[in-house]
Image: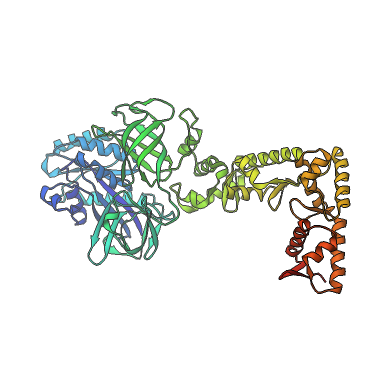
Amino acid sequence: MKNVILGTAGHIDHGKSSLVKALTGTDPDRLKEEKARGITIDLGFANLPFPDGITVGIVDVPGHERLIKNMLAGAGGIDILLMTIAADEGIMPQSREHLAICNMLRIKNGIIVLTKSDLVDPEWLELVKEEAKKFVKGTFLESADIIPVSSKTGDGLDDLKNRIYELAKITAPKLINGIFRLPVDRIFTLKGFGTVVTGTVLSGTIGLDSPVEILPSGISTKVRGLQSHGKSADKVYAGQRAGVNLQGIDKESLKRGDVVVVPGRFLSTAVIDAEIELLAESPLVKSRSLLHFYSGTSETIARVILYDRDELKPGEKCFCQFRLKDTIVALSGDRFIVRRLSPLETIGGGEILDPHPLKRKRSQGTEDLAAISSGSIEAKIETRIRRAGLAAVTKSEIEGWISCDLPEIYEALSVLEKKGSIISVQGMFFHKEAFELFKRSAKDQLDRFHKANPLKSGMPKEDLRLKIKAGQKPYIALLSVIGDIVSDKDTLRLRAFNPAVGSADEGLKKKVLDILSKEEFQPLSRAEIAQKFSVPEKNVTDLLKLLSKEGLLVRITDAVYLTKENYDIMINRLRQHFSKKQDMTVAEFRDLLATSRKFAMPFLEYLDSNKITLRVGDARKFMLK
């Protein structure tokens, strides 16, 4: 099965809905007001199946200029355009605006249909054909077939169906292997079912009971029922018109412009980097102007910031940023349309390049946007990862950033890894430039720290992270793959670094060991040692830690250190005591070491915590064998 979306376009009362009904047997006008007035006010839908399994879903759009926003809501997923021109009227204002919109949306194929051909004579019909050829010159319809039809008599309908079928066969399939995304263009309730939303599935597939998320509101729900082309379905696919029955959701909580997606992939945005192009007949646009912005089925107001100029002239294009009044869901590669605020007319459109851009100044270069605009999928993804810097990018973030089939994304990532352009660490992708900068910065910071603190075993991990300005998760991940850096609990050091006492401190080292040995079980504190030898307390602190690491001292607390000899004496005295008695009081321990309670208590707490002694009530028992 292949699913293709065909859309109508053209001026009001040029026979679009009648043509759809003649082709399919379905009247796309569904509203009472539409029936009464004989015009299409909102989107209508019908299906045109072919024997070989190709199904063409038809979106019938309104032609009245005040209803262009409804037309735009249906135009986003169109593969084939039926440009309708009434033979008795020729080209009209909405003919021009609809063509401009579809051209900006980069619809690939189409057919020019001269409706109401039964109302004119052959000579007049030839004139209208010539007018149509001039009308579409320079657009995607320049080489399109021109087929006169009459919905009333049926003339030309078979030729039109045949041409639709030929185009449907060559239409590139939508992103069936992408992540499910359905922009909502219609919402209603069915008795006994609840809320139903409809739209064109732009990518991926979804099945019954699947969890879904409604963005930008963030509502979580699941699929209660599915329908495509008028029939119930277990699954719906990219390229199909689909109705989705949502579980437990009120109609009032949804709106056109919402997007139904699989959870955890897509993010809403209110800022977009894009490439904008103005129509040749458009007025110029100044930077910071307000415009109507349309993407998918969403409509909002946007302020446009032109990056390399103060104004954009008709027919020109440039890179820009849109700052949206309302959040939307958009991917890199999506198309958009812009219209003036007043008078309300279409003036241009373009391509969304980055739906989650970094902050940038207008004076900054736009080389990254040029790479996204014209580069291969590898270039686009590499640019995205490069721009992330040390923040890194996960696979799921890339999947929800670019409009692409998943296998294409995975292949691009594989190619970039093999080339060495990116590296993957613990599920995160870093550009080689960010990785090399991180490695250089980390080693430089550690080298400076070691030179300034030769007695310290390493730099606190958090201190280095704050200096490099990296997030916790990427920071830990990158450290794990840098072989020149050694992690030791909460500190880091260069592998080649070994803390050592310099020649100038050798004398202090001997003095400290001598005084601590002499004082036995009433050792001097750091501050007392510093004062006694007239050195900074910081130097004493570093020296005590280094001597402890070398095994010459035993750290009891931050303030209390014993020489290894005195520590061994303490253990031997305990063994002698417990060889005669089963327990020991604090007073007995104090007398055993000839010390004071001030030191006896931290000694005992150290022994307890290291399971050398066990406190039972007010006494201790010996745990060593």
Which one is in front, 605 or 210?
605
The residue positioned 84% from the left and 63% from the top of the image is 591
Q: Position of residue 505 (x, y in %)?
A: 85, 40
Left or right, 465 with respect to 313, comes to: right
Left or right, 454 with respect to 324, comes to: right
Does any portion of residue 1 appear in the rendered image?
Answer: yes
Does any portion of residue 497 appear in the rendered image?
Answer: no
Give the mark count: 0
**Looking at the image, is 289 positioned above or below residue 579?**
above
Q: Position of residue 382 (x, y in %)?
A: 54, 42
**Looking at the image, is 611 positioned above or below residue 179?**
below
The quarter of the image holding the N terminus is bottom left
Q: Position of residue 57 (x, y in %)?
A: 28, 54
The quarter of the image holding the C terminus is bottom right
| Render colour scheme | rainbow
Quadrant of residue 575 within the rendered picture: bottom right
Which one is in front, 423 or 492?
492
The residue positioned 25% from the left and 36% from the top of the image is 97
Q: Position of residue 537 (x, y in %)?
A: 76, 41
Which one is in front, 20 or 131?
20
Left or right, 149 with respect to 307, comes to: left
Which one is in front, 418 or 383?
383
